[in-house]
Image (cartoon, grey):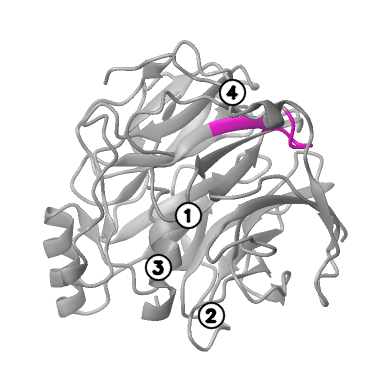
Amino acid sequence: MRPASTALLATLLAACAGASGDSATPLAAAGDTASTTFHAPMDGEVHLANIRQLTFGGNNAEGYFSADGTRLIFQRQDSVASGCDQQYVMNIDGSGMRRVSNGNGRTTCGYFIQADQRIIYASTQAHDPACPAPPDRSLGYVWPLGHLELYTANPDGSDTRQVTDNGAYNAEATASPDGQRVIFTSTMDGDIDLYTMNVDGTDVRRITTRVGYDGGAFFSPDGSKIVWRAQYPVTAADTADYLDLLGRRMVRPSALELWVANADGSEARQVTDIGGANFAPFFTPDGQRIIFSSNHASPDGRTFELFMVNVDGSGLERVTFSNDFNSFPMFSPDGTKLVFASNRHGSEPRETNLFIADWKD
């Protein structure tokens, strides 16, 4: 990863970074009614139409559709400069915004499961209810691998249940199309690997074993494949640095490429080899292409745009052209809409909001 991109990714990318309370609350009265702003696509954004801004202010990211396509779960930090992400749910028109985590610790990576009857997210609350301290930047740009456990809850935030309890980093969870199986990233066996499990935390299976970071995985629409971001050390020095930082619960991302495999981790193969940081992959509705965020085309590494690529690595195509940060894309279940996070139209530097657009093939 290019050093110039570190400030933004420290806020967003590393975040997708016990006791449980049921103190979920509505955000504000303004969240009870739809409040959206329409924006025209940027020149070149031929796949996007009727772009609507759903959030306003702070940092809002990782907006993911419910299985019925009517709601979004996302993480929000009220201030750009401070605070800890919490989980929120809202309707896709921006109405009904409600905090569904209890406000303790830092939460990340929320997702609907079990046919929208439950949600899953990661939280540091079992380790410490306070907001975690930032990582030691004297070591350069590193991501902290915090003490995160996975929790499930009702979509209104009630009936919270902790489903991992191993003191490791457990986060970046998403669900199979039927909502019954979860894929997530964990350090429970010493490395940063992908695992699957039932939504209640049973039948945990490790599906990657190569030394290096594996994370941010999603299932294909038919549930047969997975796509994820990975960084594997190449030289002996790279490996030594990786393992040293891992022992201190940190990782130093320098390059991230996309990989695909069968849902059990078999037949893994690299999709991209374009340099820079490539992350937040999601399959197109037909399962034949992958949409993702990348700074590979940015000379200084500061600009992240959305791109698409065929699952075999061919046919790279740029989707967004706003020359700032665009990431965390997800198609609606019916394939007609795309939700993503972006700095476009922000009221202050590094403000990140959620946008939803009609998708045009």
Total numbered circles:
4
Marks 4 and 2 sit apart, C-alpha to C-alpha, by: 39 Å
Per the model, the C-alpha gap separating discs 4 and 1 is 20 Å
Magenta run includes residue 89: yes
In this rendering, the label closer to the viewer, 1 or 2: 1
Label placed on residue 296 = 2
Q: Residue at x 72, y 70 (%)?
A: 320
Name the residue carrying label 4: 26
Q: Which mark is residue 99?
A: none
Residue 129 at x, y percent in the picture: 27, 29
Dot 4 or dot 2, earlier in sequence = 4
Residue at mark 3? 7
SS for dot 1: loop
User: Tag 2, which secondary structure?
Assistant: loop
Which residue is pictured at 84% across the width and 47% down the height? 336
Is 187 left, or right, of 48 in this rendering?
A: left
Q: Which residue is mark 1?
A: 80
Given residues 92 and 318, the one toward you in this image is 92
Q: Residues within 10 Å of mark 3 (few under 14, many from 20)?
A: few
Instruction: Give the quarter of the figure containing the C terminus.
Output: bottom right
